[in-house]
Image (cartoon, helix red, strand yellow):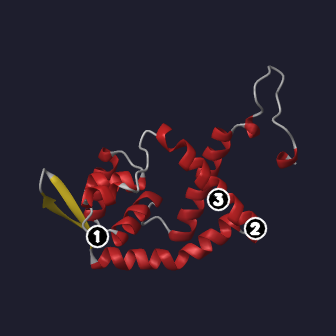
């Protein structure tokens, strides 16, 4: 079993592919996105869902702070916000310093509620092969991995950005 062996080297002294965290994380992302679309449909993407969740928690947040909250670069956040606005799920309002404040619309709230009701099914599909203890440990390790390596991201998450922006 993969979990019971030390890191393996292949013939040329390179790490075996299934011992490389980057490869496994890429595969995990592929699986998570596939399960998301199978469970939620194609009307919304995982990134759009994250933005809607953030806007429900912080109505009126500006686009730059939103990008930092959900770990997106500012141009991707702006493009995604424009798409969400075109779908009628968010409203953008002009703010000082050429910023835009974002709010969920009633349609966006409805979409988020529909998706949230299906999220337990997605979680069960992704984590159902683990015991309850392994599920908690897996999520703990993922949170630890992302927190430990956050600064190496091209768009580090800054959840404290909202508190700083309001100060």
Residue underneath mark 2: 133
Q: CA distance from mark 2 to mark 1?
A: 35 Å
Whether residues under marks 3 and 2 lie with C-beta atoms below 8 angstroms apart, the answer is no
> Looking at the image, is 150 positioned above or below residue 12?
below
Closest to the observer, 115 or 65: 65
Q: Quadrant of residue 33?
A: bottom right
Classify residue 101 as left or right of residue 126.
left
Residue underneath mark 3: 140
Q: Earlier in the sequence, mark 3 or mark 1?
A: 1
Front position among marks 3 and 1: 3
Helix, strand or loop for disc 1: loop
Identified at 32% across, 68% down, the residue is 58
Q: Residue furthest front?
A: 167
Name the mark on residue 82: none
Counting from the top left corner in percent of width and height, residue 43 is at: 42, 66
Classify residue 17 as left or right of residue 95.
right
Closest to the observer, 84 or 21: 21
Counting from the top left corner in percent of width and height, residue 52 is at: 37, 67
Counting from the top left corner in percent of width and height, residue 7 is at: 81, 35
Helix, strand or loop for disc 2: helix
Q: Earlier in the sequence, mark 3 or mark 2?
A: 2
Badge 1 local density, few (<14 within 10 Å), some, or many (20+)?
Answer: few
Residue underneath mark 1: 59
Badge 2 local density, few (<14 within 10 Å), some, or many (20+)?
Answer: few
Classify residue 64 as left or right of residue 45.
left
Q: CA distance from mark 3 to mark 1?
A: 28 Å
């Amino acid at each position: 079993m993969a979990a019971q062996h030390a890191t393996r080297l292949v013939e040329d002294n390179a790490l075996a592919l299934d011992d490389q965290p980057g490869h496994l994380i890429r595969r995990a992302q592929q699986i998570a996105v596939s399960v998301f679309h199978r469970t939620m449909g194609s009307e919304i993407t995982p990134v759009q869902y994250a933005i809607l969740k953030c806007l429900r928690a912080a109505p009126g947040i500006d686009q730059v702070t939103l990008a930092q909250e959900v770990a997106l670069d500012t141009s991707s956040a702006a493009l995604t916000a424009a798409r969400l606005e075109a779908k009628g799920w968010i409203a953008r309002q002009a703010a000082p310093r050429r910023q835009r404040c974002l709010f969920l619309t009633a349609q966006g709230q409805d979409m988020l509620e529909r998706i949230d009701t299906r999220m337990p099914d997605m979680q069960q599909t992704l984590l159902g092969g683990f015991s309850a203890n392994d599920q908690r440990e897996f999520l703990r390790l993922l949170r630890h991995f992302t927190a430990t390596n956050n600064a190496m991201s091209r768009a580090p998450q800054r959840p404290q950005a909202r508190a700083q922006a309001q100060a």
